[in-house]
Image (tube, rainbow, N blue to C red):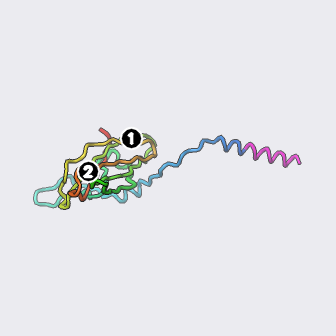
Amino acid sequence: MRNILLAAAGLTSISVLAGCAQQQEPAPICNMAGINAQRQLVALPAAAPGEPSPLLEMPLNSVSITDFNVINKLYVRSVTAQRTATGTVKVISQIINCTDYPLNVEGRTQFYDQAQVPSEPVSGWKRLNLAPRTSNTYAESSIGTKNVQYYMVEVRETR
């Protein structure tokens, strides 16, 4: 009987201690090695006259991290675009801070027409505050309606 009471007392103290443990909210886990393996970086600094450009084009309908200070600290989880009821295009992107400290970044969007020519001035930079291991949403809407067919989002560290 004494062993049963001691065992029950032990279980109670374990459950009390477990209840006191601080529970952390789930945080994103970034595999930067895998992310870096997918990136294409160009070693050459600039194009020479008559030669093709060594710079990789930033693809349309995507988010490009253009600042080397944060390229290994951020992950773009998603980017989508949709037409609003008024015909404009709204771009929404989820950016994840993969570090253990806060980051301040900013994004801007260029919208393009069917010929991939800018259809309106590039947007102003919008700031995003990212707490450690969290995400935030960047969103921008076009001014134009039917002439907008493509977009490109740039992200950099806040200056």
- Front label number (1 vs 2): 2
From the viewer's perspective, is 11 left or right of 117? right
Q: Is residue 2 magenta?
A: yes
The residue at the point 35 percent across, 52 percent down is: 92
Where residue 95 appears, as percent x and y from the top left, is 38, 49
Numbered circle sitting on residue 129: 1
Look at the numbered discs 1 and 2 and tell me whether their residues touch, using CB distance below 8 Å: no
**Residue carrying label 2:** 142
Instruction: Decide which of 106, 72 is in the foreground and name it.
Output: 106
SS under mark 1: strand
Numbered circle sitting on residue 2: none
Where residue 10 appears, as percent x and y from the top left, is 77, 45
The residue at the point 84 percent across, 49 percent down is: 4
Q: Main secondary structure of the magenta part?
A: helix
Looking at the rendering, the stretch of residues picked out in magenta corresponds to: 1-13
Crowd band around label 2 with a 10 angstrom C-alpha radius: few (<14), some (14–19), many (20+): many
Outermost residue, left direction? 50
Instruction: Work out which quarter of the rendered image holds the C terminus and state it.
Output: top left
Where residue 93 appears, as percent x and y from the top left, is 36, 52
